[in-house]
Image (spheres, grey):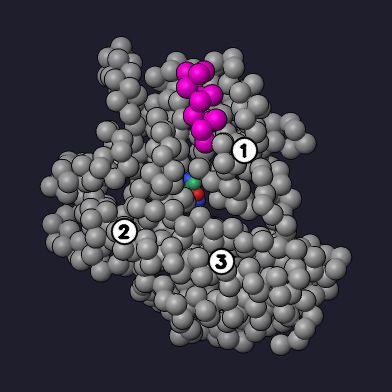
Amino acid sequence: ADGPGGVGQAAIDALMKAEQARFRAGHPQSMALAGDGADGFYQGVPMHWMRDWPLPFPLIVTGARGATLTDADGHELADFCLGDTGAMFGHSPAPVRDAIREQAERGLTYMLATLDALVVGQLLRERFGLPFWQVATTATDANRFALRVARAVTGRPKILVFNGCYHGTVDETFVRLIDGVAVNRPGLLGQFTDLTADTRIVEFNDLPALEAALSGRDVACVITEPVLTNCCMVLPDPDFHAGLRRVTRETGTLLLIDETHTISTGPGGYTRAHGLEPDLFVLGKPIAGGVPASVWGFTDTVANALDRVRADLPAGHSGMGTTLSANALSLAAMRATLEQVMTDGAYAHMERLAARLATGLTAAIALRGLPWHVVRVGARVEFICAPGPLRNGTEAEAAHAGPLEQAIHLALLNRNILIAPFHSMMLVCPATTGEQVEALITAFTEVISLLAGEGE
Ligand code: PMP
């Protein structure tokens, strides 16, 4: 057909219209509570991303447990969004809930280390293999601080990102390659400095371009996810990570691996599963089971260099840290998550169900003859409404079929399945059941049949 993803535009429009009506009819309570948005909030929501769901009015949530989320109209949704990874290990896992309850009796934030902190440092060291760690509040912050350290210890001004990347709202990473030219990412608000002055950008999987961009030895750090997950997913070529590490070492450039999404791979992230050797490592979102927290780690070499640089600086603000970072509550939740939630057993379950999900979606797509594909990184599965595999950010950008994906997301929601709004990403958590996975496959099959014009 003529439209995006090989689907007719008329079929997409018809599905969107029908599903909008169905959503209105099915959510009278959410409509009554928040039809005009929540009072007092700009755009009617406490954080404007909550308006990015393809919904006529905000969906009001009353609770969630495990992999099930309940809305104000009493719908029980199988949650494959999981707070866009913040709840990747399920909503309120019992050990985290208990740790929070206990800590709530003893104070929440002191700007002093706790008994949990004594344990967490060792847990991070053992699990991720880097000797030194710091705790921040968001992955965004962790990336900002790690990049600052990279510039400080190398004495180099620039960083390098891959096209299509996302590392949080970190100013210097908001660069894109458009028609081969580096530009400030379109859509940035209030951006009055030119970010391309200090940020180099090349395509993922393009080792010759990487080599050329680092050859001047003025780049402090390459920051990347092991797999690009924030555009339509792009897997690394088999030799890409080895090449990336070789070129960064040869040019004295540090390598920062951001595992915030790819922690879906396994208990030690993609890094441990594939033997990557980053100089700096960042993980946010689910690390404290949904309590805001992130961690960033680094090697002995970086730590020693940091000591030397700091010795020459006057006392004062380092440009790193925020007041509530590493607070007692987040450390308690992080300890519970690391010790009792992010276990080998949990990952085995996630891996098994995610594999089934990917197979089921792939079969549904094949049955309808759609030119789409499915990608999986451990517990993270994505359907992409374009042929694959995708090799870089430019291809991923072109594969993105916004209105088509939104119509599918809404249709799934009306069938009690929640997936992430920004991309067609589905996460399996330790509490996800086989029935929920089958329900998603069934709903997806039904929805794409509607799009392919085969009737309900
Ligand atoms: N790094 C990666 C890889 C991410 O996907 C994200 C968020 N999507 C972030 C960092 C930023 O996380 P946060 O918004 O929690 O700061």
- The total of numbered circles placed on residues is 3
Query: In the image, 28: left or right of 133?
Result: right
On the image, numbered disc 1 is attached to which residue?
Answer: 204
Q: Please state, as top left, top right, bottom left or bottom right, where the C terminus lies in the image.
A: bottom right
Q: Position of residue 155 (x, y in %)?
A: 45, 15
State whether residue 370 appears in this view.
yes
Bin the neighbour count of mark 2 within 10 Å (Cα to Cα): few under 14, some 14-19, many 20 and up.
few
Q: Which of pointers 2 and 3 lies earlier in the amino acid sequence?
A: 2
Q: Which of pointers 2 and 1 lies earlier in the amino acid sequence?
A: 1
Question: Which segment did they paint magenta?
Answer: 241-252
Looking at the image, which is closer to me, 57 or 195?
195
Marks 2/1: CA distance?
A: 30 Å
Q: Quick check: 47 above or below 185?
A: below
Q: Amino acid at mark 1?
A: Phe
Q: Position of residue 261 (x, y in %)?
A: 47, 51
- Residue 75 colored magenta? no
Marks 2/3: CA distance?
A: 21 Å
The kind of secondary structure element at disc 3 is: helix
Marks 1/3: CA distance?
A: 24 Å
Residue under the image location 52 percent in, 36 percent down: 241
- Residue 250 colored magenta? yes
State whether residue 57 appears in this view.
no
Residue under the image location 44 percent in, 53 percent down: 265
On the image, numbered disc 2 is attached to which residue?
Answer: 344
Q: Quick check: 327 above or below 435?
A: above
- Residue 358 image label: 3
The kind of secondary structure element at disc 1 is: loop
Q: Position of residue 183 (x, y in %)?
A: 69, 33
Q: Amino acid at mark 2?
A: Asp
Q: Nearer the viewer, mark 1 or mark 3?
A: 3
Residue under the image location 53 percent in, 21 percent down: 219
